[in-house]
Image (spheres, rainbow, N blue to C red):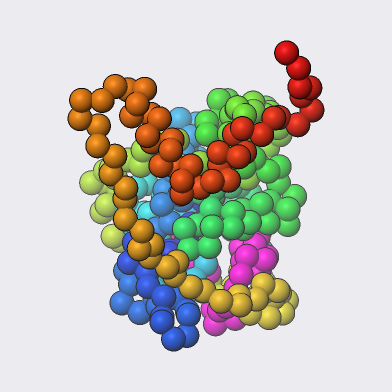
């Protein structure tokens, strides 16, 4: 079974700053990491590879330094790594990468075998759109399973998969046919420590680097800035709140009095909350 994991190298969000004049994200000097959500996708792919056999290919799109993310993925156990890199991809939003990556996955299928499963993280921490994975699924005609918390059953021979998907109000159990694309939720597993053999292999293994032509991408107008309809008007850092916490003394006071004082404090700051709580629910009748 061939499994592909789409990964992304992102700036460490804990160290990102916004330029005070241009209101743009300052990436210079900010360390990069593997998108944390993608690590859950990678571990899930490796687990099923170990259980059922096959290969795992890690792929990312980005400038040459993005190779570092793939170098970090290889010691965990990925069998190969593919970097899609070209100037034509600069300035991409989410629509353009879904096209470029879907064409790259077609090329990967021709070279190494069609993947029965494609994994991504639920989203990236630098964009938070959760659109690229579904976009790839749509372009490749893959069954799409998003926000998956658990793979309950995987039968490559029978061509089916059963997953649990987190949804509003509960968990959905879905069964569909392979091939499929899965976006994994956070906290679904714990990334392994790579073995010493994997570390040696990763140190010697080359990262396959493809440009647009290598990946079979023929229409560059659908890539990069030209293929990205999203326009960012402004990026800004939220203002730091200057309000201080309000302390309510509780010494030698009962629980009921403490709760009443806390509610009074909330209602004094947010009078609309009290009015909303006291307002009769719509559709109810007044009576005794």
Q: Residue at x 32, y 66 (%)?
A: 15
Residue 25 horizontal side relative to residue 91, left or right: left
Q: Residue at x 35, y 79 (%)?
A: 28
Q: Does 129 sit above or below residue 259?
A: below
Q: Residue at x 71, y 29 (%)?
A: 281
Q: Where in the figure is residue 212, as x and y percent of width and height?
A: 61, 75
Q: Nearer the viewer, residue 160 or 112?
A: 160
Screen quadrant of the C terminus = top right
Q: Does 105 sit above or below residue 182?
A: below
Q: Where in the figure is residue 264, as x and y percent of width and height?
A: 43, 38
Evaluate whether residue 181 shows in this view: yes
> Which residues fall within the magenta stretch?
81-102
Evaluate whether residue 184 shows in this view: no
Q: Nearer the viewer, residue 225 or 269?
A: 269
Residue 166 horizontal side relative to residue 197, left or right: right
Q: Residue at x 40, y 30 (%)?
A: 260
Q: Where in the figure is residue 151, as x and y percent of width and height?
A: 54, 30
């Amino acid at each position: 079974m061939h499994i592909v994991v789409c990964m992304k190298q992102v700036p460490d969000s804990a160290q990102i700053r916004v330029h005070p004049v241009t209101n743009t994200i300052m990436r210079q000097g900010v360390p990069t990491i593997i998108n944390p959500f993608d690590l859950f996708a990678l571990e899930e792919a490796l687990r099923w590879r170990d259980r059922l056999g096959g290969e795992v290919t890690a792929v990312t799109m980005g400038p040459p330094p993005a190779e570092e993310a793939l170098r970090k993925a290889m010691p965990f156990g990925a069998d190969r790594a593919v970097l899609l890199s070209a100037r034509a991809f600069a300035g991409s939003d989410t629509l353009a990468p879904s096209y470029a990556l879907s064409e790259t996955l077609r090329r990967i299928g021709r070279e190494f075998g069609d993947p029965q499963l494609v994994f991504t993280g639920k989203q990236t921490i630098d964009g938070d759109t959760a659109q690229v994975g579904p976009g790839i699924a749509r372009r490749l005609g893959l069954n799409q399973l998003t926000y998956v918390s658990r793979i309950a059953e995987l039968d490559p021979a029978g061509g089916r998969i059963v997953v649990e998907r987190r949804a509003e109000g509960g968990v959905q159990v879905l069964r569909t046919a392979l091939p499929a694309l899965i976006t994994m939720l956070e906290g679904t597993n714990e990334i392994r420590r790579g073995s010493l053999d994997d570390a040696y292999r990763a140190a010697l293994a080359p990262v396959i680097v493809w440009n647009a032509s290598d990946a079979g991408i023929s229409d560059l107008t659908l890539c990069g800035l030209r293929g990205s309809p999203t326009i960012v008007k402004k990026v800004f850092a939220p203002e730091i709140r200057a309000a201080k916490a309000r302390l309510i003394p509780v010494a030698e006071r009962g629980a009921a009095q403490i709760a009443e004082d806390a509610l009074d404090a909330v209602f004094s700051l947010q009078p609309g909350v009290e009015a909303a709580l006291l307002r009769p629910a719509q559709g109810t009748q007044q009576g005794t």
